[in-house]
């Protein structure tokens, strides 16, 4: 009976600490899977899990371990920002795997990467033939960056000499589920009166009738009303 109460409390505590640690360490932990972020994710997850599951693990010991690990990560991240050598040790460095259209076998061997693995990474970039590639670089987070041969690159508006329309705004949500996103409104100095006026022009009298509204790059409003299929 005691475990029914204590285990959920431990789980809540562990969840709260992990959430705080993730916020403290930064978004890089979520966006980039480097050596440091990989071992950090495994380690703090195990620490939090052990605190919840095993009775012989003291809660305070687990909390101290989690906080200590987070401090070490923060210190390493800070040092790596100041020192390129430490950054290479902590995060690794990009490696050229295709150079001037030729596979760099030495790089594949050092990365323990097969030709099949390379082809899979290329397909993820919508490249289905190595012949199309001029350079390919495996980044420190495991993602592949591809520079195609000039003849295989996409044609741009500049190449076609198509007139370019300057964007007034970045497309962004102004109404979500019947509620105004005030932070986005203030980002572009838009007032609630302006928004209501735009809605009335579209025949909508209440914000609550809108499930989603988005500011377009030309200043117009895209609106999705409730109950419309």
Image (tube, rainbow, N blue to C red):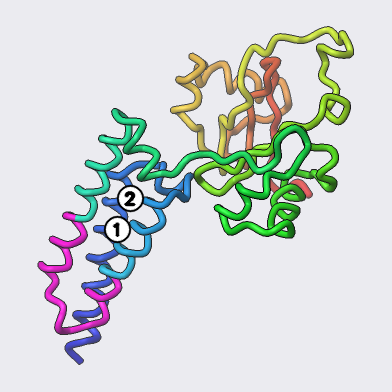
- 99 in magenta: no
Asked whether residue 210 is in view, the answer is no
Q: Is residue 108 above or below residue 95?
A: below
The residue to which callout 2 is attached is 22
Label number found at residue 117:
none
Q: Is mark 1 on a helix, strand or loop?
A: helix
Secondary structure category for the residue under label 2: helix
Q: Main secondary structure of the magenta part?
A: helix
Q: Position of residue 182 (x, y in %)?
A: 45, 28
Determine the residue positioned at 72% across, 27% down: 203
Q: Is residue 45 left or right of residue 210?
A: left
Taking depth in this image into account, of 150 and 161 the one nearest to the observer is 150
Q: Position of residue 57 (x, y in %)?
A: 16, 78
Q: Is residue 222 above or below residue 97?
A: above
The answer to whether 79 appears left or right of 38 in the picture is: left
Q: In the visual, does 113 lie left or right of 191?
A: right
Q: Residue 147, relative to residue 186: is it above or below?
A: below
Identity of the residue drawn at 22% across and 65% down: 13
Instruction: Decide: few, some or many residues near mark 1? Use Cα within 10 Å; few <14, some 14-19, many ≥20.
Output: many
Q: Which mark is residue 18?
A: 1
Task: Assign the N terminus to one quadrant of the image.
Answer: bottom left
Residue 7 place in picture, x, y as percent = 24, 79
Q: In the rendered image, is residue 14 in sight? A: yes
Mark 2 is surrounded, within 10 Å at the Cα level, by few (under 14), some (14 to 19) or many (20 or more) other residues, namely some
Q: How far is the residue under mark 1 from the one under mark 2?
A: 6 Å
Q: Tell me whether circle 1 and circle 2 mark residues in contact (CB < 8 Å).
A: yes
Magenta residues (range): 49-68
Identify the residue at the far bottom of this view: 1
- Report the residue that reaches farthest toward the front: 106
**Front-most of residues 157 and 182:** 157
């Amino acid at each position: 009976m005691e475990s029914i109460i204590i285990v959920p409390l431990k789980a809540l505590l562990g969840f709260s600490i992990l959430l705080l640690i993730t916020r403290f360490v930064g978004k890089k932990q979520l966006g980039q899977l480097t050596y440091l972020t990989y071992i950090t994710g495994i380690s703090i997850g195990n620490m939090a899990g052990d605190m919840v599951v095993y009775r012989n693990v003291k809660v305070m010991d687990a909390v101290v371990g989690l906080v200590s690990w987070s401090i070490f990560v923060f210190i390493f991240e800070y040092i790596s920002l100041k020192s390129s050598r430490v950054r290479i040790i902590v995060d690794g460095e990009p490696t050229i795997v295709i150079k001037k259209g030729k596979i760099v076998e030495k790089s594949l061997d050092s990365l323990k990467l097969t030709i099949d693995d390379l082809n899979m990474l290329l397909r993820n970039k919508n490249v289905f033939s190595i012949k199309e590639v001029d350079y390919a670089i495996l980044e420190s987070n495991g993602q592949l960056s591809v520079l195609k041969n000039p003849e295989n690159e996409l044609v741009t508006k500049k190449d076609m000499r198509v007139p370019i329309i300057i964007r007034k705004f970045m497309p962004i949500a102004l109404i979500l589920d019947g509620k105004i996103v005030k932070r986005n409104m203030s980002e572009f100095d838009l007032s609630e009166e302006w928004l209501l006026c735009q809605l009335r022009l579209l025949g909508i009298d209440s914000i609550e009738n809108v499930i989603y509204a988005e500011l377009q790059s030309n200043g117009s409003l895209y609106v999705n009303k409730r109950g419309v299929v």
